[in-house]
Amino acid sequence: MFTILTGSQFGDEGKGKIVDLLAENYDIVVRFQGGDNAGHTVIVGDKTYKLHLTPSGVLFGARLLIGPGVVLNPKVLMSEIESLEAEGIEANLGIDAKTSIIMPYHIALDELRERGRKEKIGTTKRGIGYAYIDKFSRDEVQMKDLTDPALLEAKLDEIGPAREKAIADLGGDPSVVRDPVLIGEYLEIGRRLASRVADVSYEINVALDAGKKVLAEGAQGAFLDVIHGTQKFVTSSFTTAGSACANLGVGPARVDSVVGIVKAYMTRVGEGPMPTELKDEVGAHLSKVGKEFGTTT
């Protein structure tokens, strides 16, 4: 059984909560898009877990997968893994070899570009958009590159000069592109994550063939989709259910159900239009009582 779960509004609909309610019924939970600009909070007893990349369901022992449509900040993921392990929780996690890596220069470019905009988009400044730019321009660093110093060095030699020029043109420090200390940190994380590198599409399809249950977990929401959302105030990935099939390499005929998450009153994070926004004491009350502050922003 293959189920896709997405947000049907502007994100922060409570997807993490619903996934955690459903996850114990699934063998595999997989992220198919976005990066650490998404986030979910899970509360179990008196423990609160704030996660940005680790798929929901980690507390139930499911197989967790990060698909190639995700852009991955390895430092954030490593921090989450270490935090979970400190609580005695082992994440049975696999990362697709083709998953794009958010490099330090992506974050630098994101910050510089947003700073220079007359009309702010409200980006989280985590390098998400620039990592996707490199994916579509075929200049990405992939997860497999982090596990091989020679591959990473060759990739940075190829794409480094253009990134250095772009940062310098925006008034930033171009040395971040090939900083040996930062590269060393990334390679060390790559070494630690090497055993988790997987072929996500193959693993999911084999699992479905065997009658296992797979839950594809979306990030953000439909109105933030890079095509169908409220341009230009959108995220940089495809957030609708159809992208789960494309990103994970699972045929649409294999989809058994799609779950769209909404909440009683709509909210959105960052900039962008919100025609029904309550700018009075009622809105302030809902924000306070509903704790309407996302895990990421």
Image (cartoon, rainbow, N blue to C red):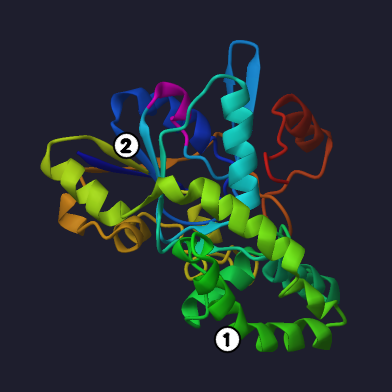
Give the residue at mark 2: 28
The residue carrying pointer 1 sits among few (fewer than 14), some (14 to 19) or many (20 or more) residues within 10 Å by Cα, namely few
Residue 243: % across, % down = 36, 61
Residue 20: % across, % down = 45, 27
Q: Residue furthest front?
A: 150
The part of the image, by quadrant, that contains residue 50 is top right
Left or right side of 252 for 97: right
The residue sitting at 30% across, 25% down in the picture is: 25
Residue kind at label 1, given as amino acid type: Glu
The residue sitting at 72% across, 75% down in the picture is: 177
In the image, which is nearer the foreground, mark 1 or mark 2?
Answer: 1
Q: Residue furthest right?
A: 171
Residue kind at label 2, given as amino acid type: Ile
Instruction: Determine if the magenta segment contains residue 60.
Output: yes
SS at mark 1? Answer: helix
Picture layout, residue 150 above or below residue 181: below
Picture layout, residue 262 above or below residue 187: above
Picture layout, residue 1 above or below residue 201: above
The residue carrying pointer 2 sits among few (fewer than 14), some (14 to 19) or many (20 or more) residues within 10 Å by Cα, namely many
Residue 214: % across, % down = 28, 39
Instruction: Determine if the magenta segment contains residue 150.
Output: no
The part of the image, by quadrant, that contains residue 232 is bottom right
Left or right side of 94 for 191: right
Q: Which range is magenta?
A: 56-61
**First in sequence: mark 1 vs mark 2:** 2
Q: Residue furthest top?
A: 45
Give the residue at mark 1: 158
Residue 266 seen from this side? no
